[in-house]
Amino acid sequence: MSAALIDGKTVAEALRGVLAAKVAGLGFKPGLAVVLVGDDPASAVYVRNKDRAAVGAGLAVRTIRLSAETQQAALLAQIAALNADPTVDGILVQLPLPAHLDQKPVIAAIDPAKDVDGLHPVNAGRLANGDPLLVPCTPLGVMKLLAAASIPTRGRRALVLGRSVLVGRPVAALLLNADATVTVAHSRTADLAAECRRADILVAAVGRPEMVRGDWVKPGATVIDVGINRLPDGRLVGDAAFEECRTVAGAITPVPGGVGPMTIACLLENTVTAALARRG
């Protein structure tokens, strides 16, 4: 048996096309502001890709580049200015921040109505209460991939491997809202492999290369691999051992080309959602 591949590139391209058509009919360009602090090469590449995708979808995108020495007060002042700017519908502060900056107050300073990363406590609370508006982009992309592949969630056992506020916790909440029976596993979970084997849907989001082995996967299960890890030889791999898992799973996302492309596409969707919500 060889698992069906869930092609995130194709799904993301289709979503960007839908968004471009929607934006073209609005009569205005939703505004996205991206704040990049420092010169981390991976963050810089990611921001360039976001800018390119946003322009392609018809958004007005602005990137504010701040030096790595930027202090907390200056960053908060920049966010306050964007909050007050009526041309800005969405604000994204690229993470991770330099070590001397405190991430939590920065996220909390963003107007929840413009928080297109979906990380503000108000948006996290709305998601936990089953009434989401702006949802973290990668978890939203996971759910869209499941829907695109016609993977049912209602009544299915879902295991989320990882409990980060960026992916693990919000994707667990989304699966719960979609009527799955959800388990969240982590480094302190007893007999992790056994817990994984019970899952009809296994979402791996721990940041450990090829941690999930083929014999951890229930035959026919869906494996959504959120991890992106670069090995010493330069290869990119996920949190699941792809070649092993694809011989057992019913469907699986590749790395790269699975969840990754969905993150930017869902950021664009969140920006359009925020723009429309702000205008009633």
Image: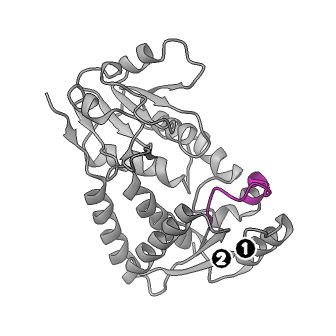
Residue drawn at (34%, 51%) of the image: 256
226 sits left or right of 98 in the view: left
Magenta-tinted stretch: 92-106
- Residue 176 against residue 56 in the figure, above or below: above
Kindly identify which residue carries mark 2.
65
The type of residue carrying mark 2 is Arg
Q: Main secondary structure of the magenta part?
A: loop
Res 23 quadrant in image:
bottom left
113 sits left or right of 58 in the view: right
The type of residue carrying mark 1 is Ser
Res 277 quadrant in image:
bottom right
Report the quarter where the C terminus lies.
bottom right
Numbered disc in front, either 1 or 2: 1
Report the quarter where the N terminus lies.
top left
Q: Position of residue 60 (x, y in %)?
A: 51, 83
- Residue 100 against residue 32 in the figure, above or below: above
Q: Secondary structure at mark 2?
A: strand
Kindly identify which residue carries mark 1.
67
Q: Position of residue 70 (x, y in %)?
A: 79, 70
